[in-house]
């Protein structure tokens, strides 16, 4: 069940980005994304958990880049979301491998996928609202985001120092 | 890189990119990641409060016997979405059935129980703690805890029950037992004649001897049977026990020591054990079932080891053994052990050597080539010569070919004398 969801997520993530890039004539990037998708599926089969992190970073970077060059934001969100789900499911499948077969893994998988679906729906909803509203970067927004960013970086630095 | 850290990095990268490019869609792109992170943190596990109880079906087992370990875990804290439980058992044990590890969700107040079956070689094994790892469903936060639940499992050496081991010692203790004490008194075996004294049972009167003398009655005297001090010395030296390809005679020696200790203690004797290997491990002499347990536990832990100090038997601490007691050495023997054993004998100890035969043991694994046979003959002659020298020094030697069962060899050499032997008045 989880592996099936993982395959769907990879196809959704990489497919969305690839479709958007191909539509705007970036064939090389689109083909590269398809290769990334194939590699990601292969890595999933081979249980290379580390590959998912790299693939997630590449996918999010390309989604961000796509937004910057004014590609369809819907496809970009769909691509980033698919990558997030695939990344999550890779780690979940790794954790499931610790469990013996006699455990009720189906119930665990069901609960995990339900939670993931809820988070996805809420995330997409909020993202869609944000895009529909088309947040204008007024001075207030810039101040707020700058404040959040500074606070965040401070927290991040203190967290790293604690570690 | 931690998953939480990666998510935070992505979120801030997107927010900063939005700021840098003055593009609001970046905030929208960051939102699913923010939701994912917040849900993960919101559902992250609190401090674990687990009540763990472990039950072992048998705390004393024999090698390769199945032992069922039952674990009962109760969650006294908050709900746990994903809990990985792993019982900490010794890596020397093998799991035959079930699993020591489980992944589950555990709500507050809920309990989870499971069984798994282990088996293993001789040894003493400690089950220290249960490892518990709690996570949220997204695996962002981990709370790990070792819940103490100490149990012990002893896998004793396989014990061969010996019905009777005939021993003679120079000195016995005051308590009655089964070893002839070379003293007249109450007993079973005829010892001598003495003048009848008031209070002697009339059936002790020897009428035939009394008839030969006027006005004097003679009574039979019997040999007193008492208990003795026995010191078992188990040779755990690497150089005498280890052979090619990791084969070892030590397990046979341990079996012999365990069986002898059991037999001596059953006969009521006071038995101590000295494991002579990498170091000296002395089990103080004692009687009965408690002492049997102590000795078996010491034997369960016994391993071979090499040490330059204890490479020869000359460091056997004789002060541990009561004077004139019986010292039983279980050892394959080396050529340089002869002098030490003769010195021990000269100090007045009664010595018995139970020697698992290393020549026959090693030969069973070697090819039957002519050169091997010739070498075996030479080594066999050397060993026979060593054993003969020991016997000439008054040391009782039992050469044990480990292909034969120990009880069979003991019965043949040190078992009770046949009834016919008694009937003709024979003495051992």
Image: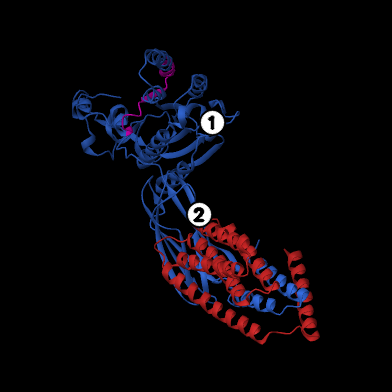
Nearer to the camera, B307 or B234:
B307
* In this view, the mark in front (2 or 1): 2
Nearer to the camera, A70 or B17:
A70
Number of the label disc, if any, that sits on residue B235: none
Please give the range of residues in magenta: B385-406
Chain seen in blue? B
In the image, residue A54 above or below residue B199: below
Chain seen in red? A
Disc 2 target residue = A46
Quadrant of image for the C terminus of chain B? top left
Badge 1: how crowded within 10 Å, few (<14), some, or many (20+)? some
Q: Residue furthest front?
A: A25
Nearer to the camera, A82 or A73:
A73
In the image, residue B123 above or below residue B8: above
The spot of residue B324 in percent (x, y) is 47, 29
Helix, strand or loop at mark 1: helix
Report the side of B401 relative to B22 (left or right). Answer: left
Residue B393 is a magenta residue: yes
The spot of residue B219 in percent (x, y) is 25, 31
Mark 1 and mark 2 in contact (Cβ < 8 Å)? no
Report the side of B15 relative to B160 (left or right). Answer: right
Q: Quadrant of residue B161?
A: top left
Badge 2: how crowded within 10 Å, few (<14), some, or many (20+)? few
Q: Which chain does the numbered disc 1 sit on?
A: B
Q: Residue at x 38, y 14 (%)?
A: B377
Q: Quadrant of residue B203?
A: top left
Q: Residue at x 29, y 36 (%)?
A: B187
């Amino acid at each position: 069940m989880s592996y099936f969801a993982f395959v769907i997520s990879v196809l959704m993530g990489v497919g969305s980005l690839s479709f958007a890039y191909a539509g705007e004539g970036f064939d090389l990037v689109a083909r590269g994304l398809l290769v990334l998708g194939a590699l990601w599926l292969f890595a999933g089969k081979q249980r290379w958990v580390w590959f998912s992190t790299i693939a997630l970073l590449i996918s999010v970077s390309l989604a961000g880049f796509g937004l910057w060059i004014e590609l369809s934001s819907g496809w970009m969100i769909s691509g980033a979301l698919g990558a997030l789900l695939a990344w999550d499911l890779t780690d979940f499948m790794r954790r499931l491998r610790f469990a013996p077969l006699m455990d009720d893994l189906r119930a665990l998988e069901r609960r995990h996928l339900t939670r993931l679906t809820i988070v996805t729906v809420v995330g997409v909803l909020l993202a869609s609202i944000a895009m529909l509203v088309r947040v204008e970067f007024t001075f207030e927004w810039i101040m707020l985001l700058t404040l959040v960013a500074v606070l965040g970086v401070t927290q991040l630095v203190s967290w790293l120092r604690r570690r | 890189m931690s998953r939480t850290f990666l998510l935070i990095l992505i979120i801030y990268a997107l927010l900063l990119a939005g700021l840098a490019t003055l593009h609001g869609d970046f905030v929208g792109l960051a939102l699913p990641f923010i939701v994912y992170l917040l849900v993960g943190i919101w559902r992250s596990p609190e401090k674990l409060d687990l009540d763990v109880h472990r039950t072992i079906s048998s705390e004393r087992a024999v090698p390769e016997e199945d032992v069922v370990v039952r674990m009962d875990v109760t969650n006294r804290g908050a709900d746990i979405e994903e809990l990985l439980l792993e019982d900490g058992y010794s890596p020397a044990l093998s799991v035959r059935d079930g699993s020591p590890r489980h992944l589950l969700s555990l709500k507050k107040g809920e309990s989870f129980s499971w069984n798994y079956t282990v088996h293993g070689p001789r040894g003493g094994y400690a089950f220290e703690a249960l490892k518990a790892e709690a996570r949220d469903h997204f695996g962002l936060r981990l709370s790990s805890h070792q819940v103490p639940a100490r149990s012990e499992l002893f896998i004793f050496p396989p014990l061969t029950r010996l019905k009777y081991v005939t021993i003679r010692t120079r000195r016995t203790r005051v308590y009655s037992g089964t070893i002839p004490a070379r003293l007249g008194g109450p007993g079973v075996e005829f010892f001598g004649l003495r003048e009848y004294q008031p209070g002697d049972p009339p059936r002790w009167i020897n009428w035939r001897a009394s008839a030969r003398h006027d006005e004097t009655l003679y009574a039979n005297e019997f040999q007193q049977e008492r208990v003795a001090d026995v010191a078992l010395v188990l040779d755990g030296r690497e150089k005498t026990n280890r052979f090619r390809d990791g084969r070892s005679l030590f397990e046979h020696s341990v079996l012999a020591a365990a069986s002898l200790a059991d037999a001596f203690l059953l006969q009521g004797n006071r038995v101590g054990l000295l494991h002579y290997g990498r170091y000296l491990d002395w089990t103080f002499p004692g009687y009965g079932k408690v002492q049997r347990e102590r000795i078996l536990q010491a034997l369960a832990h016994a391993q071979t080891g090499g040490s330059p100090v204890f490479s020869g038997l000359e460091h056997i601490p004789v002060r541990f053994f009561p004077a004139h007691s019986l010292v039983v050495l279980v050892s394959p023997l080396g050529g340089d052990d002869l002098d030490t054993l003769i010195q021990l004998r000269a100090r007045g100890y009664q010595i018995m050597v139970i020697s698992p035969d290393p020549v026959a043991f090693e030969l069973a694994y070697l090819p039957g080539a002519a050169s091997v046979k010739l070498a075996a003959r030479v080594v066999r002659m050397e060993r026979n010569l060593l054993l003969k020298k020991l016997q000439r020094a008054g040391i009782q030697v039992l050469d044990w070919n480990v292909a034969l069962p120990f009880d069979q060899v003991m019965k043949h050499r040190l078992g009770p004398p046949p009834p016919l032997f008694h009937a003709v008045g024979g003495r051992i």
